[in-house]
Amino acid sequence: MRIVHTVQSYPEKIIFWCFGSPKSLIQKITDLGFRPQASRAQVPHRDGMAFQWRFLILVVVLWNALFLVDGFVPWKEPKGPGPYAFLAVVLLFLTALALNVSARVQALALKPGRSIGEVRALVVLVLVVSAIMLLAFGAQHVAG
């Protein structure tokens, strides 16, 4: 079941998966007191992605630059991550963390009128993946 809503800080798509009939889920939601009242004109129109291009370009350029400085280039034999690769992952982790908790960072990264709620799932995914990468780098460093 897909819900179209008027709250701009919520993700554009909200999908509920249920084992029973979607009609019974809708009935249960209605029984709890929810009454759809918004007109189609009230549904916010969102153009493109929520992030500003300059923010994304900065993150990608910084990420790649740190890996290049660390010696990760296509024409050389692959090697283990060094200090700059570790720094790239740390910065990615800190950026995702700051996006989750800081309104100031959100204002720098998101387009005007957009909300972190629209991209929170993606930001949390980046946070978790970068944390796992940091743990793997740490384990590799300890192991040898």
Image (cartoon, grey):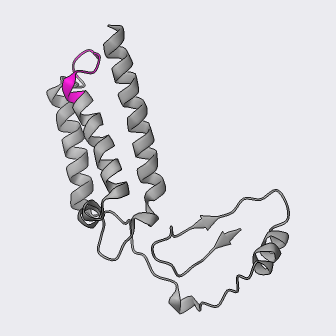
Quadrant position of the N terminus in the picture: bottom right
In x, y percent, where is residue 47?
39, 74
Residue positioned most to the left? 69
Counting the numbered discs, the total is 0
Residue at figure coordinates x 80%, y 79% from the top left: 31
In x, y percent, where is residue 12?
51, 70
Residue at figure coordinates x 83%, y 73% from the top left: 23
Instruction: Please say if 40 is above or below 143.
Output: below
Q: Is residue 135 left or right of residue 39?
A: left
Q: Please check the rendered image and state whether residue 76 is part of the magenta-colored stretch, yes or no.
A: yes
- The part of the image, by quadrant, that contains residue 126 is top left
Residue at figure coordinates x 74%, y 82% from the top left: 33
Q: Is residue 53 left or right of residue 101?
A: left
Q: Which residues are magenta?
A: 75-85
Q: Is residue 82 left or right of residue 127?
A: left
Quadrant position of the C terminus in the picture: top left
Residue at figure coordinates x 57%, y 89% from the top left: 40
Instruction: Please say if 88 is above or below 45.
Output: above
Predominant SS along the magenta part: loop
In x, y percent, where is residue 46?
42, 76
Q: Quick one: 111 or 31, which is closer to the camera?
A: 31
- The part of the image, by quadrant, that contains residue 106 is bottom left
In x, y percent, where is residue 64?
22, 37
Instruction: Please say if 88 is above or below 43.
Output: above
- The part of the image, by quadrant, that contains residue 63 is top left
Q: Please check the rendered image and state whether residue 125 is part of the magenta-colored stretch, yes or no.
A: no
